[in-house]
Image (cartoon, grey):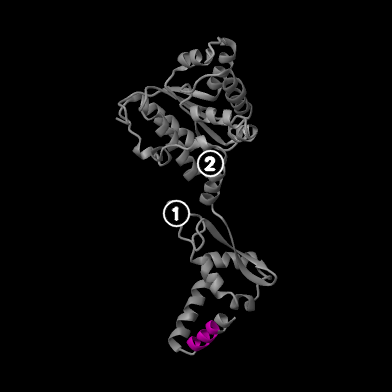
Amino acid sequence: MKAVENINETLKRLSSNPGFRQRYEEMKREIISHPEIRAFLDEHRGEVTRSMIEKSWMKLYEYISQEKNCSRCKSLDQCMNLMKGYVPELVVHNGNIEIRYKRCQKKILEDERNKTRKLIQSMHMPKSILEASFGDFSLDHPGRLVAYDLAVRFVREYEPGKKMKGLYLYGKFGVGKSYLLGAIANQLADMKQVSSLIVYVPEFFREMKESLGDHSTGEKLEMVKSVPVLMLDDIGAETNSSWTRDEVLGPILQYRMQEDLPTFFTSNFNYEELMYHLTYTQRGEEEKLKAARVLERIKYLAVPVKMEGLNQRA
């Protein structure tokens, strides 16, 4: 209470200063003529009184001094607002003009990613992949150029609910397949505010087996099945088993095929080689029909693109 009284006393003292009074009046004119304030007053015409405005100059100033659409914020860490990740909104409540803060799109995406990280540990990828960009993707080979063009087109044309095929990127180790997935995911987040999930398949299958013990298998499976854009990295590098193929991978692909949810893959195998891998389990079982079903779902979901070039990790 004492602090409030001290502030009031300071304001009274300053208001008696001609220079301060002049600047204060100039500030009020700047605020009341600001396009965002004019739009708010027009929207609430007849509801906002002059006395309400007089009591709210500092709130109005706080509102116009902050970003509303994240246009100047390169990342959530570099948010310029008073509350990082939140944008102000003017409202009329109980006869007063108030500011409410809501999450910006970058904050919403970050919260979704954190929620996913807590549940799906195998989504963790190297920092270089999580920070990947189209601008740093090397176009030193025709196959890489084709993959790049298709990736850029996908981001440009993506719309929630639109039927779109992902990519099945295959080729030797280190040619940039995973990096391109990261670039697509980052562009979707920046341009379309769409959350993607990149899952490292061998680790994900191991995690799913372990989750049988704490009964979280179903929850993990549902999240991966329904994410807006799914990216399965290094499929074929896992140890194949009937359970992971038929009870994990198969249902994920079947659901995403039925719901027309974009799905991307990377692999060292082409389709024929992946078919062979899926056919033979670690127990030596040969199950061509079940493997063929999985492969058909992959073909339905993605366009195969062979990536070649120098080893980017060398």
Residue assigned mark 1 = 77
Write down the region rendered in magenta: 6-15
- Residue at horizontal 51%, vertical 24%? 302
Crowding at dot 1, Cα within 10 Å, few <14 / some 14-19 / many 20+, comes out as few
Q: Is residue 76 above or below residue 250?
A: below
The amino acid type found where label 1 is placed reads Asp
- Residue at horizontal 45%, vertical 41%? 186
Say which quadrant the N terminus sits in. Answer: bottom right
What is the C-alpha distance between the residues marked 1 and 2? 18 Å
Q: Is residue 254 left or right of residue 264?
A: right
Q: Residue furthest right?
A: 94
Residue 117 disc label: 2
Say which quadrant the C terminus sits in. Answer: top left
Residue 88's x, y, as percent? 56, 62
Q: Quadrant of residue 47?
A: bottom right
Residue 100's x, y, as percent? 60, 63
